[in-house]
């Protein structure tokens, strides 16, 4: 039997060595971009093991010693992705699965875990709400470490393109955008995302392809 057949948590595989190398390469790219775009001040990650492992690889190169955990960034909890109700490793359990995580400071937030199972529509709405919530509360530039579907939704949300038009997100691809918060007519906060930039080979259908597919 394969790893998924034997693992007690088959929905939460660890990072591969290739994945670690890709994370380091992405971190060096982000560090180099810092002179133009601004340095990254903090990191928030999905609670899944491979995301936390990716986050520590990136943080070690960027000189960040604390990683926040946000359940709003977790995998789409469809049964095809997560076959059973997920549990998440605590900071005491993480080093058992990966000794390199022993000296890291992980800080979970108070957001509730998403319901399981969930459909893609609800997951996308969760992502959108999480992007704005995290960015509006965190000072400075923040890096979110999550999953391919999460990155695809970030691109769709911040570029205002159809959700299914983002159809390829290779490992350790990235996208960045700016959030402006202003006050509306009645004193409410108004959030406006702009300047979405893609890093890596993320593929987005252009307007003509999108129109032809309808």
Image (cartoon, grey):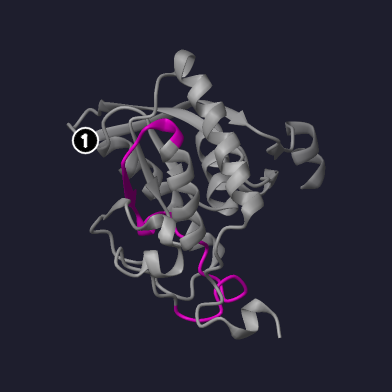
Query: How far across and down, in percent of the image, does residue 61 sit?
Result: 45, 34
Residue at the top extreme, as displayed: 36
Packing grade of label 1 (10 A; few <14, some 14-19, many >=20) is few
Residue 95 within the magenta-colored segment of the rendering? no
The stretch of residues the image draws in magenta is 61-85
Q: Which residue is drawn at 69% across and 44% down?
A: 165
The relative height of residue 116 versus residue 153 in the rendered view (above or below) is below
Camera-side residue: 103 or 122? Answer: 103
Q: In this view, does 178 lie to the left or right of 139?
A: right
Camera-side residue: 174 or 131? Answer: 174
Q: Which residue is drawn at 50% across and 78% down?
A: 9
Query: How far across and down, in percent of the image, does residue 70 sit?
Result: 35, 54
**Residue 194 in view here:** yes
Residue bearing mark 1: 188
Q: Is residue 49 left or right of residue 79?
A: left
Q: Residue at x 61, y 37 (%)?
A: 161
Query: Split into 4 quadrants, where in the image is the N terminus?
Result: bottom right
């Amino acid at each position: 039997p394969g790893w998924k057949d034997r693992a007690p948590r088959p929905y939460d595989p660890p990072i591969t060595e290739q994945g670690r190398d890709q994370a380091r390469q992405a971190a060096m790219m982000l560090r180099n971009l810092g002179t133009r775009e601004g340095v990254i001040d903090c990191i928030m990650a999905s609670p899944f093991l491979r995301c936390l492992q990716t986050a520590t690889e990136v943080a070690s190169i960027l000189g960040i010693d604390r990683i926040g955990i946000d359940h709003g960034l977790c995998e789409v909890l469809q049964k095809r992705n997560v076959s059973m109700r997920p549990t998440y490793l605590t900071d005491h359990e993480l080093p058992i699965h990966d000794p390199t995580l022993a000296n890291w400071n992980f800080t979970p937030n108070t957001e509730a875990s998403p319901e399981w199972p969930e459909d893609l529509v609800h997951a996308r709405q969760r992502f959108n709400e999480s992007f704005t919530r995290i960015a509006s509360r965190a000072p400075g530039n923040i890096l979110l470490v999550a999953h391919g579907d999460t990155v695809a939704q970030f691109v769709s949300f911040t570029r205002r393109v159809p959700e299914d038009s983002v159809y390829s997100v290779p490992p350790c691809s990235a996208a960045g955008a700016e959030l402006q918060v202003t006050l509306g007519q009645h004193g409410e906060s108004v959030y406006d995302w702009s300047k979405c930039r893609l890093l890596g080979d993320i593929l987005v259908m252009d307007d003509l392809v999108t129109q032809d597919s309808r």
